[in-house]
Amino acid sequence: MGELLLDTSVLIDFLIGGRSLGWIERRVAGDRARISISIVTAAEYLVKGSAATLQRLLDSGSLHLHGSADLSIPTRAARIRAETGMALPDAFIVATAEENASVLVTLDETMARHARRWVDVEVPS
């Protein structure tokens, strides 16, 4: 069982029933993959999204939340930002995937191109 770390674009697309929904359903059924998000993705979603919806997914175990109790993820994010010029929120998402040995799932081709240096990346189709 692997883990898929969704970036914000994929989380929103999944929740509105976009193309990511079927892709994620197939991956979870076929690979029994665990679905997770970073605290940055949660914060970005909550700018306009429903806290109740996100909490319901977390409470049900359908979605897992990764944070950091030490400096490992911030240190990785700073390195990724320095080496690529990637926006800091995106660098945190990549660093979270790297720290947790997750496959990063994104609809952002630029992020995917940069992230492949550190993690496996998939783009739903």
Image: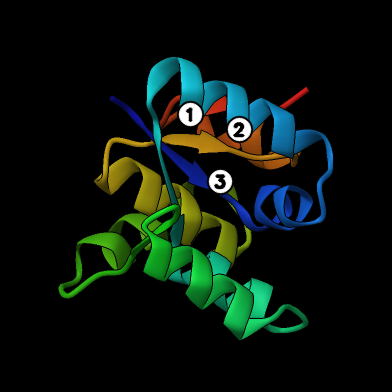
Return the x and y of residue 18 as percentages of the image width and height: 84, 42
Instruction: Quadrant for the C terminus, please.
Output: top right
Quote the CA–CA distance across marks 3 and 1. 31 Å
Q: Quadrant of residue 35?
A: top left
Residue bearing the label numbered 2: 24
In primary-sequence order, the first of circles 2 and 3 is 2
Task: Report the residue marked by disc 3.
Answer: 84
Residue plotted at (47% across, 57% down): 37
Name the residue that disc number 1 marks: 28
Mark 3 neighbour density, 10 Å: few (under 14) some (14–19) many (20 or more): few
Residue 8, image x and y in percent? Answer: 65, 58
Residue 123 visible in the shown view: no
The answer to whether residue 58 is left or right of residue 84 is left
Q: Is there a contact, CB below 8 Å, between mark 2 and mark 1?
A: yes
Report, in whole angstroms, how far the alpha carbon at label 2 lies from the one at label 1.
6 Å
Residue 96 in view in this figure: yes
Residue 118 image position (x, y, % from top left): 40, 33
For marks 2 and 3, give the CA distance. Answer: 28 Å
Q: Is residue 114 above or below residue 54?
A: above
- Which mark lies nearer to you, 3 or 1? 1
In percent of width and height, residue 112 lies at: 63, 33
Query: Element type at marker 3?
Result: helix
Residue at image position (39%, 70%) is 59
Task: Tell me the SS state at disc 2.
Answer: helix
Residue found farthest to the top:
30
| Quarter of image, res 69 | bottom left
Residue found 36% across the figure and 57% down from its top: 61
Question: In front: 63, or 43?
Answer: 63
Amino acid at the residue labelled 1? Val
